[in-house]
Image: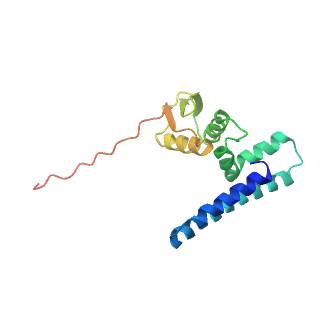
Amino acid sequence: MNSTPEIEAAANLVESLLSGFKDAEARDRAQELVRNLMNLYGQALENILAIVRESGNSAAWIQDRLADDRLVASLLLVHGLHPVSTETRVRRALSRIERFLEGHRLFLDALDGSTANVRAEPMNGNGPAPATLAHNIEQAVRQAAPEVERVEITGVASPSVLVQIGTAQGH
């Protein structure tokens, strides 16, 4: 939608759809949905303008700042406009986690579009990374690249299973 007639046509379509509701409660809910969506886009645009205003720097810097803003980045992803590749975003997420690890490195072994294969590798003779790391890796990857549907992780200890033993009855 680049031209004014297209924008006007879209606005007229939304108005037509909203006025087509016969049930007042459904119409109110639909109008609220449209308002919330408009607020979301408005906030994102406001964030973009604030980032551009504060930049006296290069286009690469501006792209990085836009990509780092979670709201703006999510809208860019929805529209296929994110300026940073999926692979780069996943690698950056792993690097952020790695800073807090002692004795382990994280590697993105493969990314096939919907699955990221991540490997945790011990350094200096350490054993496998703790099982809790797997959750942190999955969460970081999904946050950085929501288009990744599966995260397969190797080199992380299996979660320990707690077996409860009850007391024998009658003893």
Quadrant of res 57: top right
- Horizontal and vertical percent for residue 47? 76, 56
Q: Nearer the viewer, residue 117 or 78?
A: 78
Q: Position of residue 146 (x, y in %)?
A: 58, 43
- Nearer to me, 32 or 142: 32
- Is 166 drawn above or below residue 152 in the view shown? below
* Residue 44 in view, yes or no: no
Q: Left of 57 or right of it: where is 80?
A: left
Looking at this view, is 128 or 106 the one in front? 106
Left or right of 79 in this view: 28: left
Question: Is 72 drawn above or below residue 85 in the view shown?
Answer: below
| Residue that sits furthest to the bottom in the current view | 24
- The percent position of residue 168, horizontal first and vertical second, equals 15, 52
Pick whichever, 80 or 4, lies toward us.
4
Identify the residue at horizontal 67%, vertical 49% (top origin).
75
Residue 114 in the image, given as x and y percentages of width and height: 54, 34
Relative horizontal placement of residue 122, taking residue 14 as reference (left or right): left
Tell whether 136 sits left or right of 92.
Answer: left
